[in-house]
Image (tube, rainbow, N blue to C red):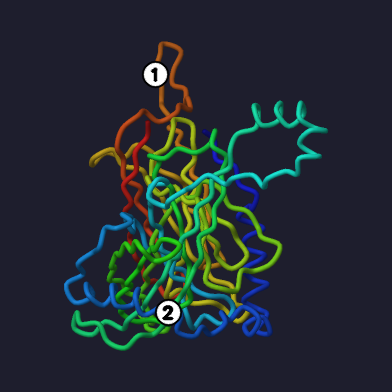
Amino acid sequence: MKIKNLVSPVLLLGIIFTLVLSPSLAAQNKEPQQRATIPPEVKSVLNEGIETRQVRSDIPFSIIKNYYLPDFPARQDLHSIFLFKVKNSDLGFTSISPAPKSPEKKEKKEQIFLRESESAPDALRAVCHIFLQFNRLENNVPGEVVKEVYLPIRFQVTSDLYEPDKEELYSTRNLLPPGNYLLSMAIASEKLEKIGTQYLEFSLPNEVSFTDRLETTPVFFLKRIRQLDNPELRASLHRGYFTYIIFQIEPNVEKIFSSGDSLEVFYFVFGSQPDESAKHSIEVTYEVLKGEETAIRYAPRTYISPLIQEALPLKQHVIIKSEEGERSEERDIEAGKYTLVLKIVDKRSGNTVEKKVDIEVR
C-alpha cells in the first residue's frame, strides 16, 4: 500500500517556522494545568505495583512505544507520546439496545421498522477509563508525582465491523519537562470493577544540554500525516494515530514496508546551530544496508530546520552490462530485512551523530 500524505515536507517546514517565529503562540499552545484526577481505588492499585513494576492484568494491554518531540514555540517541555495496544474484547464492548417505540408508531411503521432492523447491524459501545500517573524517577525509585491525567474511552462501532480478537493501536500524548520518569498507567472498566495496569520507565532530554554534540528524538516512520485545523491543547487519546502540535500522525510502528513503498522518516535533531535568521544547515546522508552491504545509497539532503520529514523511495539503481555497453535500471528493492543508516552533520558546528533503524520489506 502506498503512503499518502496530506502535509508535504515543504509545507511542514513553513508551519514550523511560523511557530518558531511566533512567541505569542507559546501561551496558547501551553497545555492547561490539571488537578489530581485518579480516584482512590485506582491509585491504590497503581501504588501496589509501583515499586516492583508488577502489572495487574484484569484488562490486559501493552505499552509498545514511547516517542518524544519538542514543543513549539516555547521549546521548554516535550511532547511525550505513548503508543499502546489493547484487544477489543477486553474493553468490554456491549450492544446498545434501541429505544422502545410507542404502540401507535410501531403499528403504523411496522413493515418499515422490520426491514430496517433486519438490514441494519447492531451498534456496540465501550465505556472505560484511562488513568496516567507520572512520578519523578530518582535512582530507580519513584519520587514525587509530577502529573495525573484522566482520559475517558467512549468508542462505538457497528457489529459488522467489530473484531473482538483484534488488538487496536491507541495513543496518549502529554507535555512534560525534561527528566527521568516512571509512568504508571491503568485501564479501568466503567464502574472500576476491573483495573489493568502497566509501568514504563522513560527519560526526556534537555534540549539546552546539547551544546557540543548532536542527538535526535526517536526516528520513526509515517504512514500518513495531515494538518489539523487547530492545535490540540490537552492531553489526548486517539485510536490508530497521535497528534503533535497541529499534525495528525499515523505511525508505521511495525516498520514493515511493501515493495515500491517509500520510507517516510520523521525526527528532530538536537544541538544544531541556527544562524541569525533561525535557519539551520543540517546535512543527512541516508543509506539502506542489507547486512553489511549497501543496498541503496541516497544523495545527501540538506535541511534548514531541525524537524525533519523525508521520503526515501525503496528503489535500487542497478548497472546492467551487455554487448551494447552499460545502462542503469531502477528496480524495487527485494523483500528482506534491512537497516536504515542516518549520518547527520551540522554544517556550522561540525558535530555529527549516526542513527540506525531496522526495517523489513515484504
Is residue 230 visible in this depiction of the protein?
Answer: yes
Q: Nearer the viewer, residue 296 or 194?
A: 194
- In the image, residue 268 above or below residue 43: above
Residue 295 coordinates in the image, percent (x, y): 34, 37
- Dot 2 crowding, Cα within 10 Å, few <14, some 14–19, many 20+: some
Report the disc number at residue 148: 2
Residue 317 placement: quadrant? top left
Residue 292 coordinates in the image, percent (x, y): 23, 42
Q: Nearer the viewer, residue 79 or 52?
A: 52
- Dot 1 crowding, Cα within 10 Å, few <14, some 14–19, many 20+: few
SS category of the residue bearing label 2: strand
- In the image, residue 316 above or below residue 301: above
CA separation, marks 1 and 2? Answer: 65 Å
In this figure, which residue is indicated by the disc labeled 1? Answer: 321
Residue at 76% x, 40% y is 103
- The residue type indicated by label 2 comes to Glu
Q: Residue furthest front?
A: 103
